Amino acid sequence: MRVASLVVACATFANMGAAAAQPYPSRPVTFVVPFGAGGPADAVARIMGERMRTSLGQPVIIENVTGASGTIGVGRAVRSAPDGYTVSVGNWPSHVVNGAIYALQFDLLKDFEPVARLSSNPYVVVAKNDLPAKDLRELIAWLKANPNTASVGTAGPGAGQHVSGVYFQNVTGTRFQFVPYRAGSADIMRDLVAGHIELTFDQAISSLTYIRNGQVKAYAVTANTRLAAAPDIPTVDEAGAPGVYISTWYGLWVPKGTPPDAIAKLNAAAMEALADPAVRQRLAGLGQEIPPPEQQTAEALGAHHKAEIEKWWPIIKAANIKAE
């Protein structure tokens, strides 16, 4: 009996050692997307996952975990095992904005390890076609002459359009009314085209089709460089609101305590994907801008994430933006 027990124990330890010695990754990797299928975050995750599986040698599974503006999905990722097999796909709203408006049960900086900074999608200041202002300078002058007259569509308190509008008001000294839409960008753009609201600040990925079709007019892109996908739209610096930079940027994170080797392999796979011409073309078609390689590292994402929290949390809290 003792000999048999010894054999079983040795076999058990041998199996444990073999499992521990397996190189990462030895099974599929799950990308947790905190927003619904078909949205911008989902699109970026699927484009990246499709290419990264080649480098990783394992399937990349997309898991959409929605609710509470992304906080439920982020919570699902942060509570997963720190083994590199569950990756949080997040962005400016999910990993920055939400921390200022929700009482989160986790720390966005301390409970995650950064993996890679991905693409970014600046916002575009868009208006209904019959708004009298011909450019951004005229728009700012019109808003100042007509305070609290214009209605600006948002996806609700704390949404990107809302935070962008608050920031725009602070910088330009303008005032307008916010109109929340539960269905988000699709309904906002529909009402903007119909002339029911005057303005919105929306991601390029959501507004470019309407701009290209001439259904709405674009005043500026909230970045310091023009969009490759829409080079005719001036930057805010050129158009009259210098420094009003707003972008929904994307990144990959894993739970705190994930082995450095796993993080390094995930980062290498992400950087290989971002260097792939086919991936770059697909992201560019969505209005996404890809940062240079030195800004794609785990360290660069960590620094950028911290800087964004330091910039945006005071703005959001000062505006008393609360989750519904």
Image (cartoon, rainbow, N blue to C red):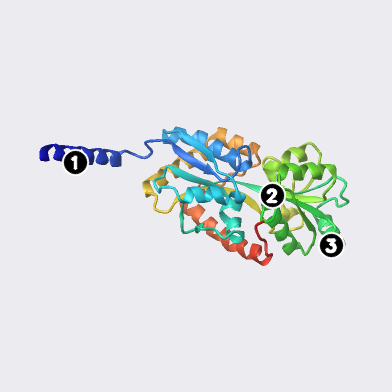
Amino acid type indicated by mark 1: Ala
Of circles 3 and 2, which is in front? 3
Q: Residues within 10 Å of mark 2 (few under 14, many from 20)?
A: many
Query: Can you say whether 43 is above or below 315 in the image?
Result: above
- Distance between the Cα atoms at labels 3 and 2? 23 Å
Query: Could you say whether the residue bearing mark 1 is in a helix, strand or loop?
Result: helix
Residue 140 screen position, x and y as percent: 81, 58
Measure how far apart labels 3 and 1 are at the Cα level.
77 Å
Q: Is residue 227 left or right of residue 60?
A: right
Query: Where is 95 relative to 7, above or below?
Result: below
Viewer-nearest of labels 3 and 1?
1
Q: Residue 297, position in %: x, y? A: 48, 49
Indicate the secondary structure of the residue bearing disc 3.
Answer: loop
Q: If you read the primary sequence from the N terminus, does the residue marked by circle 1 or circle 2 appear first?
A: 1
Residue pointed to by mark 3:
147
Q: Which quadrant holds residue 283?
A: top right
Comes first in the chain, label 3 or label 1: 1
Q: Which residue is mark 2?
A: 123
* Apparent side of residue 172 relative to residue 288 in the rendered image (left or right): right
Amino acid at pointer 2: Tyr
**Residue that label 1 marks:** 9
Q: Secondary structure at mark 2?
A: strand
Which numbered disc, 3 or 2, marks the residue that appears first in the sequence?
Answer: 2
Three-letter residue code for mark 3:
Pro
Whether residue 96 is visible here, answered yes or no, is yes
Q: Quadrant of residue 286?
A: top right
Query: Is residue 115 at all visible to an observer of this figure?
Result: no
User: Disc 1 to disc 2, how far (Cα)?
Assistant: 60 Å
- Vertical placement of 285 versus 254: above or below? above
